[in-house]
Image (cartoon, rainbow, N blue to C red):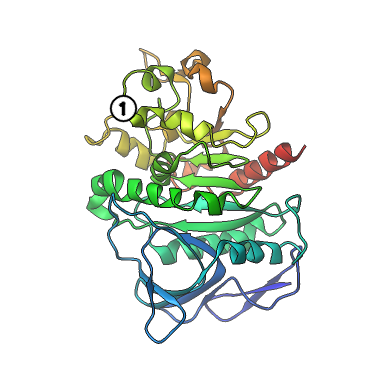
Amino acid sequence: MLRYIRPNGSQITRLFKGPTTTTPIYTIRNASTMNYNGLVLTTIDVQKAPDSDRVRFSGSIQGTETDTTATFLTNVTEISRNQFEADEVSVEKAKDIIQQRDGGEGSTESSSIKPLFCIHGFWVEPGTHLKSIAEEQKNLFDRGQFMLVPVIWPNKGGVRYGRDRVKASPGAGRALQSLKNEIDSFPRKSLLCHSMGNNVLRHAADAKFKFDNIFMAAADVRHDLFHKSYIRGGDEDERKDGLEICGMLSDPQRGKVHVLTNGADYALLGSSYNPRNWVTRLGLVGNARVKKWWGGWRDDDSLTDDEIKGCVVNKDCNSELSIFLKASHGYQFKSFAVQYYRAQAEKFNQ
């Protein structure tokens, strides 16, 4: 049994597979502070807190290309506006936290609940991401299969889009690479990236990482990332990112890179015409699609590089959105999307 405390003090009680506990994963302490008791992965630099065994980090820090460290945390508390304190945990302790959600000690890699690492997008503060993840775990994911693990990285947002794209998100990606061995100690796991979080994925991409499924939602990366014309069109290392991402699948026959798209996504329409990009975004049209001269896009599977054919699938989300949400950018946790993630997890287990 798990109890969640709303901001007004009332409680929500939910059942999930695992030991009985009265510890909520997320609580609002007052109007300005919060506490998140789940597992967190951050690429924001942490420092030892004075006179304490805990660590501190700032949600206002500016990410750089030279970021190289990533850390597992739990019991994250917002001690003041965008300033946080937490317990740093080893990878073994991180695995214990997941096992406790799935029956405690003795759980095996065949247990039902697997970590779903969730990388947020542009202009998202740590507290906002943690609150969102806690709400989604409570409302949509407590039936098993996934334990959400928020991944937070430093981004300033606002008018700093260009800087976050070319410096902060690449630095976060390289920082995640520093935990490759630790993350891969989770034998079964999946990855969900939203918006600019997919640019973090590009820079973290390494075929030595392995995930059951990779979900690229509203991806703010170029639409031809997996196309042969782009991959083989030059010698720059970044052109191989699509190959590296597909190489991260633990079993390409059962798991896939899933591209969730919305052709009316207001944010990606703007990003596509941003002079820093000037390339249609993957989250608008999906993979293996070519623009028709009279307007619109059509499928053309021959565009995908031969080395990764069959690894990438598109999921159109516009048809699932209500008329009032047709231009939505943040649909990655809508019920239809969650059902899709679950279906792919079940398919992988067959």
| Labels in figure, total | 1
Relative to 249, residue 74 above or below: below
Comparing 340 with 54, the one in front is: 54
Name, please, the residue furthest toward the bottom: 51
How far across and down, in percent of the image, does residue 249 sit?
A: 58, 36
Q: Is residue 144 above or below residue 61?
A: above
Give the image quarter of residue 62. Answer: bottom left
Looking at the rendering, in which quadrant would you find the C terminus? top right
Front residue of this view, candidates 181 and 310: 181
Vertical comparison of 224 with 63: above or below: above
Question: Which residue is labeled 1 in the image?
Answer: 236
Position of the N terminus, as image quadrant, is bottom right
Q: Position of residue 263 (x, y in %)?
A: 44, 32
Would you say 112 lies left or right of 175 here?
right
What residue is drawn where x is 43% and y is 39%? Answer: 219
- Is residue 344 or residue 41 the one in the foreground? 41
- Image spot of residue 43 (x, y percent): 40, 58
Under circle 1, the secondary element is loop
Q: Residue at x 54, y 54 (%)?
A: 182
Relative to 66, residue 216 above or below: above
Question: Relative to 266, is 349 on the left or the right?
Answer: right
User: Residue at horizontal 48%, vertical 45%?
Assistant: 193
Q: Where does residue 190 sit, x and y in percent of width and height?
A: 59, 46
Tag 1: amino acid: Glu
Drawn side of residue 67 relative to residue 148, left or right: left
In which quarter of the view is residue 138 placed?
A: bottom right
